[in-house]
Amino acid sequence: MKKTKLNKAHYTLKGKMVDFVGWDLPVQYSQTGINEEHNAVRTFGGIFDVSHMGEIFFRGPQAMDALQYLTSNNVARLIPGKVHYSVLLTEKGCFVDDLTVYMLSETEYLIVVNAVNTEKDHKWAKEKTGHFDVEIINESDAYTQVAIQGPNAEKLLSQFLDPNTDLGAIKYYHFTTGKIKALDAIISRTGYTGEDGFEIYFKSDEEAASQFFLELAENGKALGIIPVGLGARDTLRLEASMALYGNDIDDSHTVLEADLGWILKLKKGDFIGRDVLLKQKEEGITRKLVGFELTGRGIARHGYPVYVDGKEYETVTSGTFAPFLKKAIGMTYLPIEKCDIGTEFQVGIRDKMVSAKVVETPFYKRNK
Amino acid sequence: MSVNVKDLKFTKDHEWVRVEEEIAIVGISDYAQKELGDVVYVELPEVGETKEKGEACSNIESVKAVSDIYCPVSGEIVEANAALEDAPEIVNKDPYGDGWIFKVRMNDSGQLDELMNSDQYDEYLKGILEE
């Protein structure tokens, strides 16, 4: 199994370690547990090791053009210090991966991708952009990534930055570069929880990285901030209706079907999958990703069959018992005529058909 | 509820049994509830149904996973712990006491001899943790 540079810190903090797509990471920490960690992030905050994610750099005179061709969102609208959410597209307008794109300068961009797809994304990007003057380099092994999420995230992180860095000035989906103690870091106000918070990227040795994480954990105590594992990371993102590659988005559903039309900029120029998506937009989609609640007893989970008018349709893409909202929620694709709020359908849970209804998403929205 | 764990019997699937005359009270062990994590849902067995030893009769869901509970002895389900419907977390908080899941009227109390006693279960756990 691969280890992040924070591995020693997890053992010190009594992380319950599991193999997550080949990485040795905590699913939770022993003294807390998924529910407690989830609710802590919603009320105070949590710190996460997300170093398994991939960091791929695009460098060169045509870095922007290469990204514009590969992705769904409009890279030309970025300015240095701005980041956006986007999709790495297949020729059929489906997902190679979802990602965030950071503009560092006119000739340097960073994309942050899912751990399970890093090598695939890198290979795909290089193959498809041979005609652009750009170098695409996978620097994932060098980078440690820590997320601090929750209402007290800014209070905690400010303690570690030099006094000249005004964290409050960094708006949502913007980033800065600065020093965290001796470490050069990229600090963005982004996250995968639905809370305010930051994602921090830096290169360092194990010693400095683990030290930083342990200090965050120590200083976090006074603010109610605790270390949080992958289990709660998943329940948090689902409550906030954020998609997960492999569950809600994949290479067989399009960007429009996944209800991510807001990051699809068809007018920006040519890009992979544009023809298919343009046509689909004109003709209309025949199915869509929706959020639902169970109205009967049970918990819907990934892979459970979905029944529309009694007939099997697709399967639940993501589902859980939401720790903060305290209800069974999930996402699934439904025929477009069944996607209105309130529409009822059923989920097969072992030998029972449990009733469900389409609800508005996001399930959870934080008070601003 | 205070319970003397030493008096309980255990199965290899980490269920415990407490005997009160012809009734076997069943729950899951502390080891099992820790492994599961936060319990968010318990599907109780139907009262009145007859179950064979080893038959799946209930399941417990944690945030991340679903686990079957197997009936440790044959008999009729006479009671299920309804408190777990609204407060499944009791299984985590008091696995041997208030976290009991169901009660079986045994039709063959000899089956109890096939279960492990508390010391044997401790040995069994040691073996698992060493793997």
Image: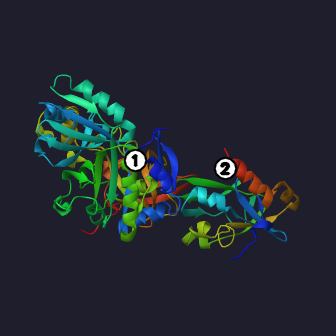
Of A151 and A298, the residue lying toward us: A151
Q: Which residue in the protein does label 1 denote? A: A207
Residue type for callout 1: Glu
* Secondary structure at numbered mark 2: helix
Mark 1, secondary structure of its residue: helix
Write down the quadrant of residue A90 in the picture.
top left
Answer left or right for B29 relative to A67. Answer: right
Q: CA distance from mark 1 to mark 2?
A: 30 Å
Q: Position of residue A56 (x, y in %)?
A: 27, 36
Callout 1: few (<14), some (14-19), or many (20+) C-alpha neighbours within 10 Å?
Answer: few
Image quadrant containing the C terminus of chain A = bottom left
Rendering coords of residue A58 (x, y %): 21, 34
Image mark 2: chain: B
Query: Which residue is at a point 59% across and 66% down the rendered structure image?
Result: B92
How crowded pointer 2 is (Cα within 10 Å; few <14, some 14-19, many 20+) is rated as few
Q: Which label belongs to residue B129?
A: 2
Q: Nearer the viewer, residue A190 or A299?
A: A190
Residues A33 and A3: in front is A3
**Residue furthest out toward the top:** A131
A256, above or below A241, in the image:
above
Image location of residue A157, percent across then percent down: 28, 61
In the image, what residue occupies the spot 56% across and 68% down? B89
Q: Is residue B110 left or right of residue A344?
A: right
Residue A269 point in image, percent of width and height: 11, 35
At label 2, the amino acid type is Leu
Query: Is residue A242 in view from this perspective?
Result: no
Q: Would residue A363 be seen by someone viewing this image from the given angle?
A: yes
Identify the chain of the residue marked 1, using the numbered disc in the image. A
Q: Which residue is at a point 46% across and 38% down the rendered structure image?
A: A2
